[in-house]
Amino acid sequence: MPDYLEHAKIELVFLPPYAPNLNLIERFWKFFEKTVLYGHYYETFPEFKAACDQFFTGLDQYHDSLRSLLTDRFQIIGQG
């Protein structure tokens, strides 16, 4: 650890090199896929694009789900 961080008011926490569960955009992307892609068939690209646009313009309807999903309260397992 650099000397200037020894007395800083922050705590460095080791994160594994690949941890999608700790990356908020990965959690959001997974929610998008589950909502828009899984179990849905779009006959044409414009139908698919419209579903994507509807998802992103209507994020308010997913407020409760996203609020619980996109939180920084998580537990790192295996840290000793």
Image (cartoon, rainbow, N blue to C red):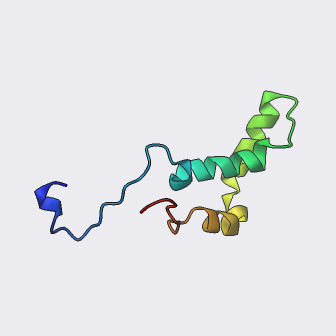
Residue 18, position in %: x, y?
49, 43
Q: Residue at x 69, y 52 (%)?
A: 31
* Position of 10 relative to 44 (above/below): below
* In the image, farthest residue toward the front: 80
> Is 47 left, or right, of 11 in this rendering?
right
Rendering quarter of residue 53: top right
Q: Which residue is drawn at 78% across and 32% down?
A: 46
Which is nearer the eye, 11 or 63? 11
Count of labels in the image: 0
* In the image, farthest residue toward the top: 44
Q: Quadrant of the C terminus?
A: bottom left
* Position of 54 relative to 78 (above/below): above
> Is 74 left, or right, of 61 in this rendering?
left
Rendering quarter of residue 36: top right
* Position of 65 relative to 22 (above/below): below
Which is nearer the eye, 48 or 4? 4
Residue 4, position in %: x, y?
12, 60
Residue 75, position in %: x, y?
52, 66
Which is nearer the eye, 25 or 54? 25
Q: Which residue is drawn at 55% across and 66% down?
A: 71
> Is 52 left, or right, of 44 in this rendering?
left
> Is 27 left, or right, of 44 in this rendering?
left
Q: Which residue is drawn at 17% across and 61% down?
A: 5
Q: Quadrant of the N terminus?
A: bottom left
Which is nearer the eye, 54 or 32? 32
